Image (spheres, rainbow, N blue to C red):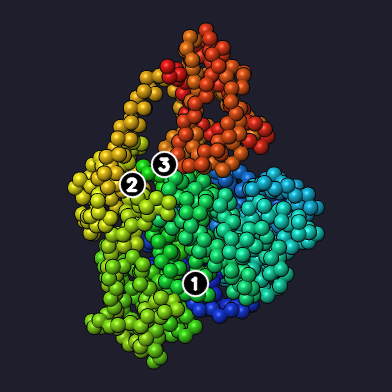
Amino acid sequence: MKNYISLVIPLLFAYPTVQAQTFLPHTQIKTTVSEKVNIQAKAYNLEEVTLYQSPFLVAQQADVKLLKWMQPDRLLAGFRTNAGLQPKADKYGGWESMGLAGHSLGHYLSALSLYYGGNKDNDILQRINYIVDELNEIQSARKTGYIGAILEEDRIWSEVAKGDIRTHSFDLNGGWAPWYTIHKIMAGLLDAHIYAKNPTALTVATKFADWADQLLTNLNEEQMQNMLKCEYGGMAEVLTNIYAFTGNEKYLKLSYRFYDKPLLDALANQEDALPGKHANTQIPKAIASARRYQLTGDKKDQDIANFFFQTVLQHHTYATGGNSNYEYFGQQDKLNNTLSDNTTETCNTYNMLKLAQQLFVINPQTSLMDYYERALYNHILASQNPNDGMVTYYTSLRMGGSKEFSDHEHSFTCCMGTGMENHVKYNESIYFKNPNGGIYVNLYIPSQLDDKSQGIQLSQQSNIPTTDFVSFSVNSTSKKVIPLYFRKPSWTTVFTISVNGKEIQPILDEKSGYYVISQKWGKNDQIQLQLGSGFHTEAMPDNPNRRAIFYGPVILAAQLGLDEPDPVEGIPVLISNSNDPKDWVQMENANYLNFKTKAKTAYPNTIALKPFNQFVNEHYTLYWDVFTADQWKVQQAKYEADKFAQRELESRTLAFFRPGEMQPERDHEFTGEHLETGEDHNRKWRIASPKGYMSFTMKVNPTDNNELMLTYWGMDNRDRTFNIEVDGKVIAQQDVNQFKESKFYDINYQIPKELTKGKSKVTIKLIPKDERNSAGPIYGARTVVSKK
């Protein structure tokens, strides 16, 4: 990947950071509509929290470099074109030149606004104001209140307004999730209003909401529910917040129209309706319910948000805090066979952290911040390449996998959009304030809180888990008692608190689970926490012998090198009769958090480990299969059998075709229509989209029985039924979705002998079953002589 920017990261000074949309009940930012429920924790103002040096600051600075490198005019190009105005620059590639064009501008505007809220960077402010002014001009040119950059949007919205609605997952009347993009633009405008104090931004957002209200006026409930089958992002949430800032109840009513009745009613009734659902389509719906509950007191919304969060956390979440495989929720507690390069879409965790925040302000709980910390350290921080600010779409959990990062010109996916925001807002939940002036210390990230309203400053120095101690300097001019609430992390092996050198016994707040010190604070009071970091594991819910190893809050992953490891012997396993991870792994260098497996514990060799969030280009595994000595004897025999079977297959192979590679495709006369290619699970693939096909030639034995072997990956979750032809004759029909585990499937098809008699090669053709289906993806093709 080419680096387009040079990152020079200063390391010696503190750096203010920010908070993000979702908008939270706040200590200083006031809304027109006040919350109707009792808010138990409020977010601090952006300027009141400052990050000190840490990996989080490094990641933030890389993100800011990226934001300043990007050109607003390229993100605005599609909007200007669709409004009949001359674009000022060419579009970016990737999704910005496809059906979801425009969503990146919304994320970009949010990220700029959030960063400016804590930093008052003039270059950032100029970008914000320029974009808002441009959107205002574009909106005025269109004269309807609408703003958009998607293809055929006028036709789409005209049909929707008439009740002519055709939906399928991400498709609304031929458009790619258009409401999703609208939400991103509205959210960016609202953030520009909230954090950059731009008054025009709220006006533009409100006119946009008026357009949506008018568009949907004549739709009945059945038509609305049909429309909502297509992903619509956080429309309900942003409309709720526009209601909060304007006081106009029509926006609240409109938010309720974006209510997916089948799903949300099931959640309200405590039913897990998530298996088989696209994960990130659902999470914003729960965020909207949580925020709406705060403003209305609607108990049903509260039940939805709480049950959704707990269900995802307890039954659908990997050790990193991420969820989903191929973007979809699977069956409850069935994660063992879903480790792939397409696990844990980053957008999902971005939204789950937002939901955790919304639940925390109503009912502060250590468990919510335990999850927040786990996901922040092990997925969000791990999703960025700190060298250039590029981010992952999926964060691979495949054993032997590696991270694939976006690029500067040709990505602009949803996760690049949320990635712009993720890394400018690391301080958003370190501290919260309760109604009595108490301060929640949630995260042990080096930082400073300056609570001017109470005259107290809290400076935190921490290097968890490199060291076990966290130190706070407290300086206060207040004459009142200010309680400090400290979270005891779920992973800590020791938890002690000292004030000015004397160990004390803090009070446990049983409702929240926080430990509380209440006293009047003076000048330079010192608090020290000892949070003992040790090894612990988290097992797969459906396989207690497949485990992730943690040291303190961070997951440790095996360092498997820059090259793809051998699928049989290259993935290490642990062999021990002990169930204690400290008998498997030992510290090598505490300063750099380097570890290695103990002697004779790992097969095939001693393996080095380090925190997962430090990996960039290396291959890794963060889940380990753990065997006793007796179990390993059986497993090792299986490994040998697998190697023997592979050698036997090679001996019968006539031809092997690797799709997606130039020379093999030439050698096998590959051709087709409506073709796509890509790479997952460290292998290239080819697929023929609806109305297309793919064709290639393969050697056969003219006198023997032949078989065609095609390689697929399971858990695809889309329309993938197609016919397989040999020299024009259908020999099989295949539905890839019958393969339910995240692994490669080698499927054999007997080729009728009359089709190969006297021939040295045949033409294989894969044709979609109908206009909804695709053919493939295939990861390989092989012709073999049948076993005797």
Q: Which secondary structure lies at badge 2?
A: strand
Closer to us: mark 1 or mark 2? 2
**Disc 3 marks which amino acid?**
Met
Vertical placement of residue 404 versus 698, above or below = below
Marks 3 and 1, the one that precedes in the sequence: 3
Q: Which numbered dot is residue 625?
A: 2
Q: 364 or 472: nearer the eye?
A: 364
Secondary structure of the residue carrying tag 1 is helix
Sequence-first tag of 1 and 2: 1
> In whole angstroms, how far apart are the C-alphas of marks 1 and 2?
35 Å
The image quadrant where one finds the C terminus is top left
Q: Which residue is mark 3?
A: 1
Residue at point 63%, 35% (across, down): 773
Q: Can you give x and y, in whole percent of width and height, for residue 69 in the image?
A: 47, 52
Please identify the quadrant where the N terminus is shown: top left
- Badge 3 marks a residue whose secondary structure is loop
Residue at figure coordinates x 23%, y 55% from the top left: 583
Q: Amino acid at mark 2?
A: Asp
Which disc, if any, is residue 80?
Answer: none
Q: Position of residue 605 (x, y in %)?
A: 23, 42
Which residue is the site of mark 1? 360
